[in-house]
Image: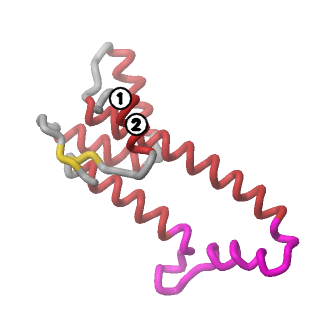
Amino acid sequence: MISLQPSKVYPIERVIAALTYLSAGFVGGIWLILAAIMGKNITQFLRYHIFQSIFLSLAYFVITTLLGYLYVIFVHIPLINLIPLFLNSPIQMFMNLSIIQVFTTLVILYLAITSFLGMYSYFPWVSDIIDQNTGRK
């Protein structure tokens, strides 16, 4: 579900929101620090996308770390060790990217493009948490 923001979104906010997804939250984090130092308020649109990007980046890091530990355990079990091999094998059709890399890239592009268009992008479960914490709902 993608919803348009009722108020005007400035072009610089769209660019920063898109860049924060492409940089795993780094640009948004810098923007938050600069706004705090200068005593400026960040719009709800930008706050939503910055927090969502940081939350998704941290969640991705934690999930991949935990899956890496599980892989070390499961690599010794016959037939189950083929699942990670299949998911991480490069595929010629997708420019030698694995299925996991293609999925991750498509999600990042979806989030960056919708934020650049001035929309609130929806990512299941995560967007609901961000909505509650940024006061959007």
The image quarter containing residue 47 is top left
Q: Are marks 2 and 1 in contact (CB under 8 Å)?
A: yes
Q: Nearer the viewer, residue 82 or 105?
A: 82
Amino acid under disc 2: Ile
Left-right relation of 24 to 113: right
Q: Which residue position is annotated with label 2?
A: 130
Point out the residue furthest to the top here.
Answer: 39
Q: Quadrant of the N terminus?
A: bottom left
Q: Nearer the viewer, residue 57 or 136?
A: 136
Q: Position of residue 43 (x, y in %)?
A: 25, 28
Q: Is residue 27 above or below residue 116?
A: above
Tell me the residue at 36%/60% (across/down): 109
Point out the residue furthest to the bottom here.
Answer: 92
Left-right relation of 105 to 9: right
Q: Which residue position is annotated with label 1?
A: 134
Q: Position of residue 70 (x, y in %)?
A: 77, 59
Q: CA distance from mark 2 to mark 1?
A: 6 Å
- Determine the secondary structure under disc 2: helix
Amino acid under disc 1: Thr
- Determine the secondary structure under disc 1: helix
